[in-house]
Amino acid sequence: MKDLQKLGAMAQAVGDIYADRFDVERDATFYLGKMMEEMGEVSAAYLKLTGRARGADGAPDVLRGELEDELADLFGFLLLFARWQGVDLGAALDKKWGAYLQPAEDACDDP
């Protein structure tokens, strides 16, 4: 498994290719729009996989592959957005979600 820094660098390299190929200006509209687009595609793939949308009659392994591909696209654009904003996603997740895993006595500031 690759760490988030390596995945972020890979996403950046692919993002550079994409931007050059399609002459894209990478700004807030681009990053936020792409994440919204990919989230819609994740939703559509999931609904097809679970029999709740047109195209649900496809082969289960193909539908599962579509969901995996769309999740990868969403994650890639999330990594790109985070890098663009200078956010270390691993550290942010550890800080935000990891706080819930701390023992209760470590979470309070009793003197």
Image: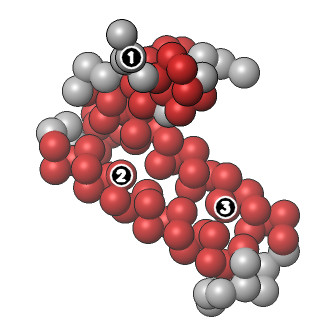
Q: Name the residue under label 3.
A: 66
Is the residue marked by circle 2 packed among few (<14), some (14-19), or many (20+) residues within 10 Å? many
**Residue at mark 3 to residue at mark 1: CA–CA distance:** 50 Å
3 vs 1, front mark: 1
- Residue 50, quarter of picture: bottom right
> Please, which residue is most extreme toward the front here?
111
Closest to the camera, between mark 2 and mark 3, is: 2
In space, the residues marked 2 and 1 are separated at their CA atoms by 42 Å
Q: Which of 50 and 19 is in front in this view?
A: 50
Q: Which amino acid does label 3 sit on?
A: Glu
The foreground one among 15 and 91 is 91
Residues tagged 2 and 1 counted as in contact (Cβ below 8 A): no
Q: Distance between the residues labelled 2 and 3?
A: 17 Å
Classify residue 9 as left or right of residue 83.
right
Which residue was labeled with disc 1?
A: 110
Residue sitting nearer the eye, 61 or 4: 4
* Quadrant of the snapshot with the N terminus: top right
SS for dot 2: helix
Q: What residue type is labelled 1?
A: Asp
Q: Would you name the residue on which mark 2 appears? A: 35
The reply to whether callout 3 and callout 1 are in contact (CB within 8 Å) is: no
Q: Where is residue 91 in the image (x, y as percent from the top left)?
A: 43, 18
